[in-house]
Structures are given as C-alpha cells and as structure tokens.
Image (tube, grey):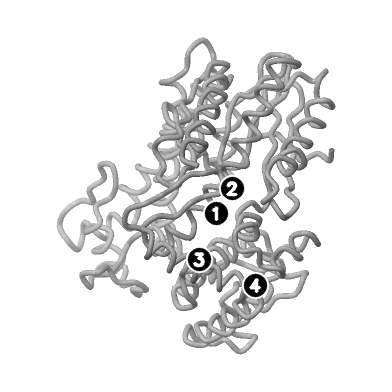
Amino acid sequence: ELKRAYQFFHKGLLALSDAQGVGICIDKEYYLKEEEELIKKIKLLEYKILNGKEARLFERKFKRKLKLKKEVSTKDLRDLFFGVMEMRSIKKTNTGLESVDEEVLNQMDNVFARRIIQRRKLFKILSYINQYKKEEVCGKIHPFIDLHIARSFRSASSNPNFQNIPVRDEQAKAAIRRGIIPSKGRKIGSADYSGMEVCGAACYSKDPVLVKEIKAGADMHHALSKKIFLLNEKQTTKDLRFYTKNQFVFPEFYGSYYKNCAYNLKDTCYELETKEGVKVREHLKDKGIKTFDDFVEHIKKIEKDFWEKYHVYDEWKEKRIIEYQKKGYVDTFFGHRRGGFLTNNQLLNTPIQGTSFHWLLWSFIELNDYAKMWWDTDLIAQIHDELIYDLDPDEEEEVWKETKYIMTEKIREENDWIIVPLKIDIETTEVDCSWYTKEKINV
C-alpha cells in the first residue's frame, strides 16, 4: 500500500513538473502600474492616519506622536481607542488587556480603524505582486508544486505560492488575478471539483443519509445555514453558507462541538447581513435569540439534530479514533499513512481532505498524459481541488468533454470505493482576457 502511494505521488510530481515547465503568463506592465497605484494609496492612508484628528487627540493626551512603522503599535492602538476615544472593549487578550486584533477593528464603526485595516490589506496585495515580479522570467512565472511538505498529503506551492491567492476579498482578488493571463490567442480555463470533502466523508463512512443526499444533489451547507440563522430561502446568502460550511459542518465532521462552533459563528457572522439587509445579530434577536447564551443553546440543538441525522458518520468517526489509538496511524484510500501524535481533528480530516486532493491529482495525471498526446492545450497549475488550463479555443469543446469524463466518470470506473457521484464546475475567460474575468459555463 505504501509503495502504491509512493508510485502515485511520483507520477503526480512528474505531471506537476510538466505544468511548472510550461509556466503561467503574467502581465508585468499591469503589475508595475498596480504597484504604483498601491504605493500611492498606502502613502495617502499613512498621511491620514498620522495627521487625522485621532492622531492629534493622541498626541495631546500622551505628549507623543503615534508611531507608524510596519504597523501602528498595539500599545498605541489600545491607548487611542480605549484611552483617548473611550471606546467599549469587546474582547480581551490572554493577559487581560483590551484586544485590538483584526476581528475587533472590523467591528469598530470608526474611520481610523477602517484605515488601519485597508492599509494592511493593500500591503498584503502588494506582497503578492512583488512575489510574481520577483519570480517572473520571460513573461511567465513557474510556481513549484510539492507533494512532500503537507503532512495531510495535499500539495504545497512556492516561488511564488500560487495557492493562496485571495478569493473572498474582491479588491485583492481583482488586483492579483487581472495580471494573470493566457498565452496569446488563448483562454484560461479551470475545472474545479465541487463538494469534495462531503463526498470524501460519504465514501469513508458509507453514511446512507449522506450518500442519498449527494446523489440527490442536496446542498447540506445551504440547508443548515437556514436552520442556524433561522432564515428562509430569500434571506440566506453565499457568505452565510460559506461560514456554515467552515464554522459548523466541517468542524463537527472533524471532532469539534457546539460551543466552539457557536463562538466561531458569532465572530464571523453576527455582523454580516441577510439578503434583506438586516444584520444577522438583529435578525436573530427578532427570532427570539437575544443573547449569546441563547445562540449557544440553539447551536446545541442544531448539533443534536445533525448527529441524529448523520449517526452512521458519527459512529465511523468514533471507530476511527479508537482505531488510531490502537495502531498509531491512519490510512487513506490511495495508500498513504499518517502516524505520530495526531489530534482528533488531524486523524479525521487527513483521510478526507487528503483524498479530496488525491482525486484531483489522479485526474491531473490522466489529463496531462492525454494533453501531451493529443492537444496543444496545456495544464499550467493546480490549486486545491482545481486544475487550470492554458486553453486553445479550437480545442475547447474536446478539452471539456474529456476533462469531465476523466474527472467524474473514469475515476469512478477505476476506483470502485467512490460510491457517490463527483461533480465539477468549469469556468473560462474570453480569448486574451485575464483570469479575473472567467465565468462559469455549462458543459
């Protein structure tokens, strides 16, 4: 089994090195202009931070100026917000001091706090652009994609890291992806597996309810977001679905419990708005959940219902923990084995998250071999559960037909333990257009 896993990863590295050799085209002139604009915006923000009324009030009270190097110091922020502006503390550090972390700043209805957050974001965007400029050779970047770093047997990217490009922040996403372009006369195309962790959980646990829902095309994250936040179909949003998935479903799958989920959901979702423009916090109050303790009890009931419904997965989870305690390792379907000290979270998510990536890697190997034999189209990158093409428009129909067959049908023909249908989302740009402009298409 371990030899099989090695051989699989060896083939994977060869396929990924082919993609690295092809490289990803970037628009260097665009990035140079974007860098100039970002630096101008950062300097303007710094001027406003250091010369605004908040800075003057700070200097008047403490007889010293605000310090701004890489950041405004934590001490100065704390003195300003709670000593000068007398704002209410909503969170404490482990040492009992008022917290001024990003979560706290995001919840402040304050111009100064928004400027601090915006400056941090612009610096982060600038760091991505500088990575690409540094690694650019003849109009392309050639990121490394390694399979020997992540202990969960997923991939890792470096020089530059092409796997951590912001997706949820629209400003950062636009600034970076507008500089990633296809070869002349081509498109950028991507195929992204959908719902892979839930599919992986179903294959390992064989939970009949989970399997049935996947086959029926049910969206458990969407359904649970409505239950958690007491919303109807017209009120829930993509953001609430996203946080339901990442702050409740997967934490529960991997061994967390209702109190931790409630704290995280409160921190990420209370200030979000429903589709009707009502803050989640206020909406929950209208529904009778007036305090955080009320919310904790509500999530406790949601958890109880969740595990009554998916009790077979819950039983598999407990068996997996006992099995690890006896053996000292966990195995995956593709033959990988992870040993050593593992938390419950690690021993449960390693097979599921690892296998989700291995489906993508298996498909990448197959498609790379096919492309080298039959297409001018090139595979150029892999990001999590997504593969990316530098796509010849004349081959587009054939590429997507073969891609869909390999990623959703052939993989199941050759791996009979995959007991649920696999789905992919396909997106493309227009010819010579940047990655930012890609749109979903039906195949």
- The answer to whether residue 430 is above or below residue 185 is below
Q: What residue type is labelled 2?
A: Ser
Residue 239 position by quadrant: bottom right
Q: Earlier in the sequence, mark 4 or mark 2?
A: 4
Q: Which residue appears at 35% of the width and 43% of the height?
A: 46
Q: Name the residue under label 2.
A: 356
User: Mark 4 or 1, which is nearer the eye?
Assistant: 1
Q: Distance between the residues labelled 1 and 2?
A: 6 Å
Q: Mark 3 points at which residue?
A: 251
Of the 4 image quadrants, the one containing the C terminus is: top right
Q: Distance between the residues labelled 2 and 3?
A: 17 Å
Q: Do the residues labelled 1 and 2 touch (CB within 8 Å)?
A: yes
Q: Which amino acid does label 4 sit on?
A: Val
Which one is nearer the viewer's eye here, 32 or 391?
391
Residue 334 placement (x, y as % from top left): 55, 43
Q: How far apart are marks 4 and 1 (CA)?
A: 36 Å
Q: Which residue appears at 47% of the width and 34% of the height?
A: 6
Q: How far apart are marks 1 and 3 (CA)?
A: 13 Å
Q: Is residue 275 left or right of residue 246?
A: right
Is disc 2 placed on a helix, strand or loop?
helix
Q: Earlier in the sequence, mark 3 or mark 4?
A: 3
Which one is nearer the viewer's eye here, 409 or 218?
409
Count neighbours of disc 1 (C-alpha within 10 A) and say few if under 14, some if 14 to 19, many if 20 or more: many
Instruction: Residue 236: tell me if it is visible.
Output: no
Q: Is residue 219 left or right of residue 249?
A: right
- The answer to whether residue 291 is above or below residue 178 is below
Q: Name the residue under label 4.
A: 278
Q: Which residue appears at 42% of the width and 57% of the height?
A: 346
